[in-house]
Image (cartoon, grey):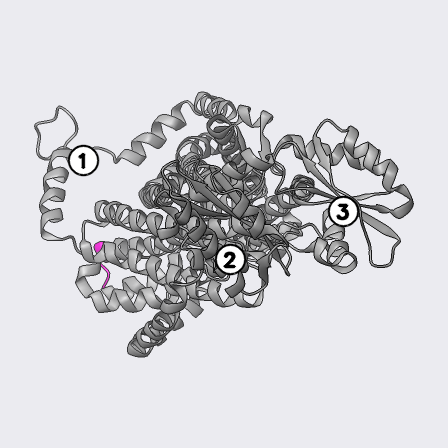
Amino acid sequence: MQQFMLKLDRALTRRRWLVLGVWLVVLAVSLPFALKQSEHLTGGGFGVPGSQSEQVAQLAKDDFGGAGHARLGAVLIVEPDAAKPDVRAALDRVRAAARAAADVDLAPGAFAKAVSQIGEPTIIVALATTVDDVKSTDVANDLRERLGIGGSGSSGPITTHLIGQGALWAGLQEVSKKSLAEAEGIGFPIVLLILLAVFGSFAAAALPLALGLVSVLITGGAIYWLSRVTDMSVFVTNMASMVGIGVAVDYSLFVLARYREEVHAGLSPERARGIAMATSGVAVTFSGLTVMASLAGLFLIQSTSLRSMALGAIVVVAVAVLAAATLLPVLIRFFGHRAYTRGRVFSVLHVASRNRSRRRPGSTNPDAPPAPGFWESWTARVSRRPGLSAVLAGVLLLALAAPALNLQTEDGALRQFAKTDETRVGFEAAAKVTGPGASSALKVIVPVDQVRAARATLAGDHEIARVAKAVPSQDGRTALLLATPRHDGESAAAKEAVERLRDQLPTAKIGGNAAGLHDFDALVSGSMWKIVLFVLGLSFVVLLVLLRSVVLPIKAVVMNLLSVGAAYGVLTLVFGTVDTITPPLILAVVFGLSMDYEVFLLTRIRERYAATGDTRRAVTEGLASSARTITSAALIMASVFMVFVFTGVPSIRQLGLGNAVAILVDATIVRLVLVPASMELLGKWNWWLPEPLARILPRTSFEEAPARA
């Protein structure tokens, strides 16, 4: 792999203009599609194949005609000072929009009923569609645009809102789009400031930032086209951007830092670039493949939403790896000395700081040997009391993870909106008139001879507010009962009613919004063990091959679990209840990203151990040579994640906070305390490898520069 990377570097040097031109063309082609990447994203993908809720949805569509179609509604909130002619004009606009839009029209008698409500503070106009809940998102988007919702239709004495499942996801598309733009607008400047502090050069800082921007934009274009051929969740853009910015910047940071290190050690820029690509470049490629494999573990859950989010993250990591391997070396050559020298201002500051730190504290002798570096001193302190260091770090991690024992999950779209968002305002206004569960009725399909008994069971349940008249199927064998819950379909009470009624009505099939969410919760919680086994096994095998040790991979897996547990614990403390999709996403992302730091740190330590045979010295030298880059990379990654904590919808905020906590814990408590302390305690046992395995495992070396470089 190292020889391949050297050949690639030489080929890139010879054809640098062609390489740069290809990337510019791909970027130019992707840009217009990236700007509209959210247009075809869907709120669907939370269905569970084979579940009762999916069966009911299909039966309602096939056997009950319009009963299986999605329902929407326009909600007019009228201020006391609104004139009646203006209210009538607003109703006329709703009627005109419904007639002009495809797949939707006024429900029978809906307009006349709405007109009769003029004078009331809230007017609801029922809209009938000819599509299911998933496709109703496109209908809702069309209606939002025609009614000016979010613009002129959402201001003045009469505000218009849209309700229904499709309206929820259409509104969430808009919120996600705005929060993504805000997050990227804040995130890139923060990353630039950190890179300036790391490199002391605007030119050098611009390189990782450029790769991050390129990766996110190209992935945005890819998401647009993927969403045209398959269902992609509305959250995929935030997921891809969150992971993409951090990963692309981190990967280019690792390569650029190694390049600058070799140049400052006295090598020519050409040789330094070759060594950087043959060492850190290979490690970046391998780490990226590992991250993608870890994210692929989410495909073990039969959920379109989770799989689409995993796919978006995999695509952006793939683009980031490709950019770090091909575009970055070309840009380094074009930037010349600016890629490895400090700017004038930063040079002055660096010299002043170095002059202050060269002497030992209290020394006035200019010839006194320089004091040990921070990382050498830190490792020495940890190694002097490894047992105490390990215990304190372990106790802290367990304390952070303890609240996760009470981790509770929930899902749904309505609670993703702020209380002041127009979509939520519309739903809550409608709920005051019709009841919270009116827009999320349970759909109960029973044999026609059991309708009376089923109706009595439903009416007798304390969560059911009312039961509509039974609708017979086209073949007359079954009937559909619509049961309206007292709480909205995303509430715990409605989901508990689903579970309770399924026990009481074993011959019935129960679907609807609450049933679908209940089935999705059960799917994810019941599949977590698959993802855990997958990522644990993947991490162990990868580190076993890289480190040629059985002990170190086991230790790394345990430490990663502690990092994830700490993230879950903090989420429980901050949010109380977390979104259903958050735990599996954090597990896959954190295990994948932590492999970056694991690979860069432990392969450096292994190389030093092979050269010296001294574990303490290997840890000290390996940590000293990689800790600054690792902590800088972790700070960038955590900063990007934290930006989404303050700009995203709740599920994205939870994902950002969980990932940020896990990455910071991994890069500080784990890498700087637990790793050196545990390696000091284990001594030569760190490198234990049974002879049969030693014979069959390949010999790998990422950080040792090949002779041909």
- Horizontal and vertical percent for residue 180? 38, 51
| Residue 460 shown left or right of residue 196 in the figure | right
Label at residue 370: 1
Label 3: state its secondary structure: helix
Label 1: state its secondary structure: loop
Front residue of 435 and 51: 435
Amino acid type for the residue under numbered disc 2: Arg
Label at residue 77: none
Do we see residue 250 in this rendering? no
Front residue of 102 and 240: 102
Classify 462 as above or below 156: above
Which residue is identified by label 3?
A: 52
Which residue is identified by label 2?
A: 95
Classify 566 as above or below 659: above
- Horizontal and vertical percent for residue 656? 43, 41
Q: How many numbered tags mark residues here?
A: 3
Q: Which residues are magenta?
A: 264-268
The reply to whether the magenta stretch includes residue 267 is yes
Q: Earlier in the sequence, mark 1 or mark 3?
A: 3
Amino acid type for the residue under numbered disc 1: Pro
CA distance for labels 1 and 3:
71 Å
- Horizontal and vertical percent for residue 37? 44, 62
Amino acid type for the residue under numbered disc 3: Gln
Label 2: state its secondary structure: helix
Q: Earlier in the sequence, mark 3 or mark 2?
A: 3
CA distance for labels 2 and 1:
81 Å
Front residue of 51 and 494: 494
Instruction: Answer few, some or many: residues within 10 Å of disc 1's Cα (few below 14, many 20 plus, some between 14 and 19).
Output: few
**Looking at the image, do the residues carrying marks 1 and 3 touch, with CB atoms under 8 Å apart?**
no
User: To which quarter of the image does residue 128 belong?
Assistant: bottom right
Classify 315 as above or below 588: below
